[in-house]
Amino acid sequence: IESISPDDEGINLTIAGAVFVPNSVFSDIRNVDGSERSVNKLYSINLPDAIELGVGAFFGADNLKRVNAPKVQIIENDAFMSCVNLTEIYFPQVRKIEGPAFQGCDRLSSIEIPEVEEIGYAAFEMTNIPTIDLQKAVTVSGRAFACNNSLTNVNLPLAQRLEEWTFRMC
């Protein structure tokens, strides 16, 4: 961990040097007195060196609003599932997003994933993304963007495979 800076909104966390953020990395964090500590105080996360985010890495981090991970290439299942206050993500080099990585992030409205080629099952289901511009996406799995009531614009020029119910109830 490079820095932890608390403020009125929560904790801003920077983890430098970590190439892989493991499964449920914050699930066993404890307070100094040994009592359980929730990931709910995380407000923003900066992962400048991470290449891969493991299964459920930030699952249920209720207060998390922003994620900046400029080198991440793979986001595994459930990595940010149910992060209900997440509003913006920045993953400019991500190539693969497994499902349901962002499912239930119902305030997610800004995504920057220009290099993504594969989006997994229900990866962005129940979000509020108004525009999907995926210039390099080839495969978009079923229900990837389902139940997104804000969706008004979709651009998938290279898509070769759109599975069943990709945009169901949009």
Image (cartoon, rainbow, N blue to C red):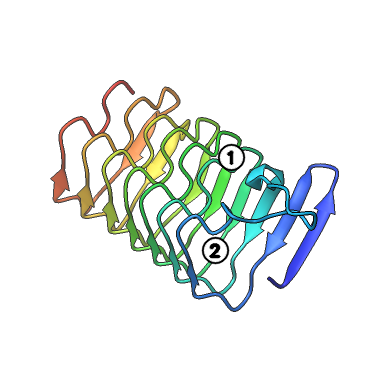
Q: Is residue 40 left or right of residue 161?
A: right
Give 33 or 58, whichever is nearer the viewer: 33
Instruction: Give the class, few, some or many, for how many residues have Cα within 10 Å of label 1's Cα (few <14, many ≥20).
Output: many
Query: SS class of the residue under badge 2?
Result: loop
Picture coordinates of residue 11 (x, y %)? 75, 52
Q: Is residue 67 above or below residue 81?
A: below
Q: Amino acid at mark 1?
A: Thr
Give 62 or 105, whichever is nearer the viewer: 62
Residue at numbered disc 1: 87
Residue displayed at 52% across by 37% down: 108
Q: Is residue 8 left or right of residue 105?
A: right
Picture coordinates of residue 143 (x, y %)? 26, 34
Give the Cα distance between marks 2 and 1: 15 Å
Q: Is residue 18 left or right of residue 158?
A: right
Residue displayed at 16% across by 39% down: 163
Give 51 or 42, whichever is nearer the viewer: 42
Residue displayed at 64% across by 69% down: 15
Query: SS class of the residue under badge 1?
Result: loop
Image marks 2 and 1: residues in contact by CB distance under 8 Å: no
Residue extending furthest toward the front: 34
Instruction: Give the class, few, some or many, for how many residues have Cα within 10 Å of label 2's Cα (few <14, many ≥20).
Output: many
Assign the C terminus to one quadrant of the image.
Answer: top left
Q: Amino acid at mark 2?
A: Ala
Picture coordinates of residue 71 (x, y %)? 49, 71
Q: In which quarter of the view is residue 126 placed? A: top left
Assign the N terminus to one quadrant of the image.
Answer: bottom right
Q: Is residue 48 left or right of residue 157?
A: right
Res 57 label? none
Picture coordinates of residue 69 (x, y %)? 54, 63
Residue extending furthest toward the bottom: 17
Residue at numbered disc 2: 69
